[in-house]
Image: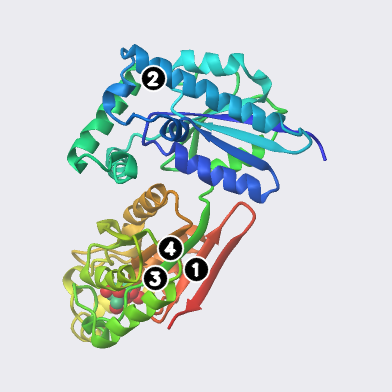
């Protein structure tokens, strides 16, 4: 076995997806037999400092004492990473230094202690306001902010970000770097030298969503389903509620911290049952996952549509993917919002091995087809039953889609 090693140094403002990416990257590398360590400045600071260091002024560059303390933690963290790499150098190893590292000065300090040809900087960029806001809300739910109000924690975190913005110098002079759009899984620019170990693997990882377990569920039976009516905002039937309880039992032993739903009651009601069987679980409704809008046909049954608007039924049959309901949507016009919903889910599902989405028939077809290639014209015919769910697992090495029973 060759002795290959690499330091990956993360760069980016808070809430830009660095830690999520770090966690997933390390997991992906480990699966390939590459020993990978994560060295997170913040974790070290929280572990070692006795006083509370989460207040915004701790991050003010003008606060000399705090800046010196943060520098000390950065050096300590770097030394831990070096010790990890140097310990028995007979293996493939990657040390990921996870911290903001936004100032050129900080990066010079890190580089001066490391062999430059073995350092790859990865700068995480995401300027989507809604996502950053959601991410901040998520972060302030952690124990670090337990002793202040949520409002104060959010304001404080934003202040902390503004201090980092003041000293932020994007990567430019460094020898090897990749800038990545963490929301869209895109490499925005790169300056990399050949010969760097694991480079192709890491680049491929950056553009591939890595999903340990995604449970894609359709809401349980509703009163509209009984009568074959489309759209609307119907509630679950007694059988539907029993189905939802079946789902809850099925997932009770798996940790589901977040359930993503549409903004419609049938998905939320289904999820509430699942949530009840969990210790710590939140439901996040996204309008992006609302069912296809049937426009003038909303609330009608397929038979009523055939009888009263035969031209609608005929045109849809001829070209289901591209057909747009008058005053409503078609599969084609859902593309953008569904893709955005999926990206939000992936971005916010940090620290969790299990992601759950409770959606609708057309929505779940679109979600599935995002992950597995399908000809567009075949998408509206994907089987989305209510007594089963899709279990999706995606890594660089394999894509698995299983239709599973519950209850
Ligand atoms: O019938 C349930 C439902 O979710 C409707 O609300 C929606 O219009 C329909 O399924 C989508 O399926 P299809 O595109 O096959 O009509």
Q: Earlier in the sequence, mark 1 or mark 2?
A: 2
Residue depicted at 53% across the width and 21% down the height: 75
Please provide percent x and percent y for residue 94. Answer: 65, 35
Q: Is residue 11 above or below residue 115?
A: below
**Residue 238 appears in which quarter of the rendering?**
bottom left
Q: Residues within 10 Å of mark 2 (few under 14, many from 20)?
A: some
The residue carrying mark 2 is: 168
Viewer-proximal residue, 107 or 328?
A: 107
Residue located beneath label 1 in the image: 391
Quadrant assignment for the C terminus: bottom left
Q: Residue furthest front?
A: 50
Instruction: Find disc 3 in the rendering and name its residue.
Output: 217
Report helix, strand or loop for mark 3.
strand
Q: Give how far apart the Cα atoms at labels 3 and 1 are.
A: 9 Å
Answer yes or no: disc 3 within 8 Å of ligand 1.
no
The label nearer to you, 2 versus 4, is: 4
Q: Distance of mark 4 from mark 1, alpha carbons? A: 15 Å
User: Is tag 2's residue or tag 4's residue first in the polypeptide sequence?
Assistant: 2
Measured Cα–Cα span from mark 4 to mark 3: 16 Å
Residue 319 shows up from this direction: no
Front: mark 4 or 3:
4
Spatial distance from mark 1 to mark 2, Cα to Cα? 41 Å
Q: Which residue is mark 4?
A: 255
Residue 24 x %, y %: 53, 46
Left or right side of 259 for 237: left
Q: Residue at x 20, y 85 (%)?
A: 304
Quarter of the image that includes the N terminus: top right
- Position in image of residue 395 (x %, y %): 58, 54
The mark that comes first in sequence, 3 or 2, is 2
Q: Quadrant of ligand 1?
A: bottom left
């Amino acid at each position: 076995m060759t002795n290959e090693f690499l330091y990956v140094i993360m760069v980016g403002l808070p809430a830009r997806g660095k830690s999520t990416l770090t966690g997933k990257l390390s997991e992906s590398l480990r699966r390939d037999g590459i020993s990978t360590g994560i060295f997170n400045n913040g974790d070290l600071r929280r572990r070692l400092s006795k006083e509370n260091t989460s207040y915004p002024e701790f991050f003010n560059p003008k606060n000399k004492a705090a800046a010196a303390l943060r520098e000390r933690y950065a050096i300590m963290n770097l030394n831990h990473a070096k010790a990890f790499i140097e310990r028995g150098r007979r293996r493939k190893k990657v040390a990921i230094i996870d911290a903001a590292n936004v100032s050129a000065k900080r990066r010079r300090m890190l580089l001066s202690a490391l062999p430059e040809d073995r350092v790859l900087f990865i700068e995480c960029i995401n300027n989507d306001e809604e996502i950053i806001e959601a991410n901040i809300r998520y972060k302030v739910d952690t124990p670090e902010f337990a002793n202040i109000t949520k409002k104060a924690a959010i304001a404080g975190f934003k202040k902390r970000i503004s201090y980092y913005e003041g000293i932020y110098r994007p990567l430019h002079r460094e020898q090897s770097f990749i800038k990545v759009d963490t929301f869209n899984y895109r490499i925005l620019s790169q300056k990399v030298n050949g010969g760097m170990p694991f480079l192709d693997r890491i680049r491929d990882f950056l553009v591939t969503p890595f999903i340990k377990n995604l449970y894609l569920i359709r809401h349980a039976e509703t009163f509209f389903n009984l009568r074959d009516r489309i759209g609307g905002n119907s509630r679950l039937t007694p059988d539907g509620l029993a189905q939802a309880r079946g789902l809850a039992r099925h997932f009770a032993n798996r940790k589901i911290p977040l359930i993503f739903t549409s903004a419609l009651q049938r998905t939320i009601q289904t999820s509430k049952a699942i949530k009840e069987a969990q210790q710590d679980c939140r439901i996040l409704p996204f309008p992006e996952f609302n069912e296809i809008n049937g426009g003038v046909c909303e609330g009608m049954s397929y038979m009523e549509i055939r009888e009263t608007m035969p031209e609608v039924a005929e045109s849809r049959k001829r070209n289901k993917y591209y057909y747009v309901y008058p005053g409503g949507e078609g599969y084609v016009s859902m593309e953008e919002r569904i893709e955005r919903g999926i990206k939000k889910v992936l971005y916010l599902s940090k620290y969790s091995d299990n992601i759950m989405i409770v959606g609708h028939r057309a929505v779940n077809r679109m979600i599935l087809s995002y992950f597995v290639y399908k000809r567009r014209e075949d998408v509206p015919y994907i089987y989305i039953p209510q007594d089963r769910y899709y279990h999706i697992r995606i890594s660089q090495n394999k894509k698995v889609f299983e239709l599973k029973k519950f209850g």
